[in-house]
Image (tube, rainbow, N blue to C red):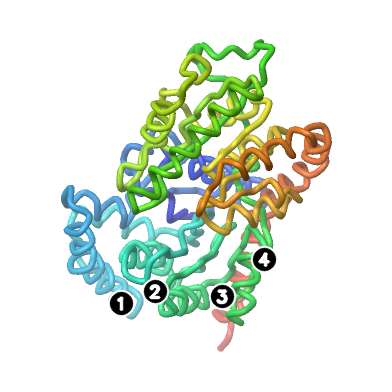
Amino acid sequence: MTRILVTNAYSARNRGDAAIIFGMIESLRCTGLFRDAEIRVSSADHPADAALYPVPLVPSFHSLKNRFSNSPSANSLYFLIVLLPISLLWAVTWRLGRFDLPLPGFLRELIRAYARADMVVAAGGGYLYTTSAIHGNVVLLINVYSFFFAVLLGKPVSLYSQSIGPFAGSWQARFVRMALSRVRLVEVREELSHQLLDGWRMPTPVRDAADAAFLLKGRPPAEHLGIAWASAEPTVGMTVRRWFRDREKQAGYERTMASFVDWLIEERGAEVVFLPQVTYAEGHDDDRETARNVVAMVAWHDRVRVVEGELSAQEIKWLCGRMEFFVGTRMHSNIFALSSGVPTLAIAYQPKTQGIMSELGLGDCVVQIEGLALEELQRVFDAMVDRKSEIRSHLESTIPALEAKALEAGQLIAEDFGRWKDQQGDAGAKP
């Protein structure tokens, strides 16, 4: 039985990341080689995620770092001077002579999971990027180290469907390129990432795939949410998020979204429902807080609803699919809506949003979060409404192909692992 360790999982309380993990498990298990595989997930939200995934969970370097203190700076230092050197020393001695150095208890479960694994698959997503040449370097290091540690142990490593870049510093790009050059396979989920890797001229094969979240199945929430689905007015679903470090920029984004909500209600007779895509993150990135900030500035409070419950990814997807239109800053909320056939206006905070919307042939339904203007939101929304039937028909014909492409991602990894096993067998057979 093949043992697979999935690394770089963030948190099931980020419903987009949860959808990726659920989709990955389905995609891998649909292959003949991995149908009965033992799959474990290394999560940054360990142990909270243990009850939310259908496979065993182990901690990650991120979760171990965050247990040290409530200070992000102290936690980063703890990783650099404790977790990194201890794990590196263990990897070197294990690789050279299979010598198993004693490990402190807090590291043992994670390191043993790497050692037991026959292969490692880095979870799909968009975590290999930077927005600053100064901030976030330790986070990038841990994100890379989480899969590269397996390379140091001689394990075959593949990266599931990714968005890669951009990078604020050239050395950051070189660092990621070095790491990706040592894995067996990199899958990308949109053309912009493929173009970046083509420019790097890496020796590693790069394959096109689709985001695993397209495979998630919706499920009605168990609780009654009091949303008037049968209302004669259009229901517009919405996600907002904290994105800008600069408080004034963030406040400007929230003011623009509040004005847009008022316009939707006053001019288009809509009811607006804010859905919480993320309710946990390092840095307290809770979408409900941002939604409350927006709603506090809206004049028509009786026509706006913030869903406050801790719903699952499947429940959030079901809710997205019940909307007539969707306006999403969170990329995976857009995927949830689009894969349910809902015309969607995407607010792009990273190139991955533009890339995935363009893959769907809906690049004209995107606005950029930088310099977000009410007039542009209104113009793109009105154009989307005018094309409602056309967009629905387009999604109906397009989404099945993306779902098939997402399933194929697991098969590509299985085929590469099969080749690796054959190579190991050939090497062992040589005199």
Of the numbered discs 4 and 3, the one sitting upstream in the chain is 4
The span from disc 2 to disc 4 (Cα, nearest Å) is: 23 Å
Asked if labels 2 and 1 touch by Cβ distance under 8 angstroms, the answer is: yes
Q: Residues within 10 Å of mark 4 (few under 14, many from 20)?
A: some
Residue 129 x %, y %: 46, 64
Near-viewer residue (171 or 234): 234
Q: Residues within 10 Å of mark 1 (few under 14, many from 20)?
A: some
Of the numbered discs 2 and 4, the one sitting upstream in the chain is 2
Question: What's the mark number on residue 92?
Answer: 1
Question: What's the mark number on residue 207?
Answer: 4
Circle 3: element type: helix
- Count numbered badges in the picture: 4
Residue 381 x %, y %: 67, 37
Near-viewer residue (425 or 81): 81
* Residue in the image at 78% along x and 47% along y: 401
**Looking at numbered disc 1 in the image, what kind of residue is underneath it?**
Val
The span from disc 1 to disc 4 (Cα, nearest Å) is: 31 Å
Q: Which residue is mark 3?
A: 424
Residue 23 x %, y %: 59, 43
* Residue in the image at 55% along x and 46% along y: 373
The span from disc 1 to disc 2 (Cα, nearest Å) is: 8 Å
